[in-house]
Amino acid sequence: MSELSQASPSEPSQDPASPGESSEDAPIGVAIIGGGPAGLSAGLQLVRANRRIAILDSNRPRHSATLRSHGFLTRDGASPLELRRLGREEFEAYPTAQFAQAMTREVTPLSHEAAVAAGFPDGIGFRVRGSGIRGAADVEFVARRVLIAAGLTEELPALPMIRAYYGTALHSCVECDGFEKTSKPLALIGETSDLFARALLISRFSSDLIVFTNGAETIRPEQEAQLAAIGIRVERRPIDDIVGEKAEMLGVRLADGEVIPRVGGFVRPRWHAPVEFMGELPLERDDWGLVVTDDRGETTVRGVYAVGDIVPPGPQQLIIAAGNGARVAAKLNMDMIRGALGVGLVDE
């Protein structure tokens, strides 16, 4: 059945499946790479649009060190892993949903002829291959569209003990964890160009803040003067390490041996978008390495969409990622509807 087939009101049109073909082997509407809030939210919206959807998830969430997430309506304080579990259960409750525990290895465009033969009337399609993890089987899907929601990998400042306090005393998301740091002596550690803006944001939670640039010239003199005017000090000396006792952070030790007492704070990682599975396809990136999309969420590769932390402006709260997943899913669904009818891309 192609997407141009007429369907009775009691049998809504779904993505194509050939007679006798098992649901696991049949072509699907969208292969979603990544099972975090953005990918799960998009998947839920699309299965509810009678789309056959597969989510490939490597089970390597960036926020695995975070014990509690905040700001997610009805789930404030829940762990990010619990949110993922609940989201997967809701997604898999639909008959056209598939969830594969797999690391995506390759996304290959189909030729126009192969896509049409698979039942994709607009001649756009992809073959998506993944390697099973934790004993799961390898997977292969033929999909009309691909949605990259794989999130980011993060590179923290090269300090030996920083991981020991990351997710408890130190965090990367001010909006997510700032409230719990109210009025405490905090550190902001980073070497990126947006450190000044992050310091201003943190000032809403504590006036006892020191910005550590670790020797990098990321804060201009006029910015330092503005921070000083609101009581925020900039420490430019190189950092040796984070110090503490067991799980309790006690301070930041500089390379010259001085320990500046701090009980927690925020770090600004460098982000990396893990899209090696796209091979040589011309996926445009911005200066930060994030995947560029248009207003509909489509990348510079026709038929490939992206959402979540992997697109500008980068990591945000989980509820924002989930909302953006739903928004892009609606645009993607309309793209496939119009593509099946041959009426173009514009959502008028």
Image (cartoon, rainbow, N blue to C red):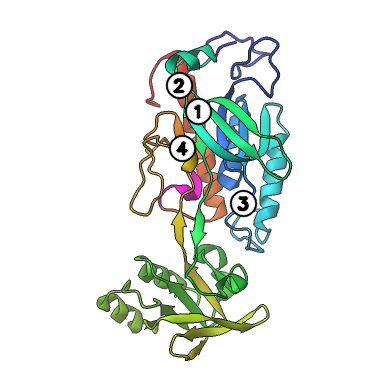
Is the residue marked by circle 3 packed among few (<14), some (14-19), or many (20+) residues within 10 Å?
A: some
Mark with earlier residue (3, 1) = 3
* Magenta-tinted stretch: 305-312
Residue 309 painted magenta: yes
Q: Which residue is mark 4?
A: 278
Which residue is labeled 1 in the image?
A: 145
Locate residue 234 relative to residue 221 in the image: left or right. Answer: right
Position above or below: 141 against 342: below
Q: Kindly report which numbered mark, 4 or 2, lies closer to the viewer in this rendering.
A: 4
Query: For the residue marked with disc 2, what is the amino acid?
Result: Ile
Give the secondary structure at mark 3: loop
Question: Looking at the image, is mark 3 or mark 4 earlier in the sequence?
Answer: 3
Q: Is residue 197 magenta?
A: no
Cα–Cα span, label 2 and label 3: 30 Å
Q: Residues within 10 Å of mark 2 (few under 14, many from 20)?
A: many
Q: Nearer the viewer, residue 52 or 111?
A: 111
Residue 198: assigned label? none
Q: Quadrant of the N terminus?
A: top right
Per the model, the C-alpha gap separating discs 2 and 1 is 7 Å
Question: Going from the N terminus, do you reach mark 2 or mark 3 first?
Answer: 3
Tag 1: amino acid: Arg
The residue singled out by tag 2 in the image is: 124
Nearer the observer: mark 3 or 4; the answer is 4
Q: Select label 1 or label 4 by which is in front.
A: 4
Q: Which mark is residue 60?
A: 3
**Crowding at mark 4 (Cα within 10 Å: few <14, some 14-19, many 20+):** some
- How far apart marks 1 and 4 lie (CA) works out to 13 Å
Q: Are marks 2 and 1 in contact (CB under 8 Å)?
A: yes
Task: For marks 4 and 2, give the CA distance.
Answer: 16 Å
* Residue 172 place in picture, x, y as percent: 51, 65
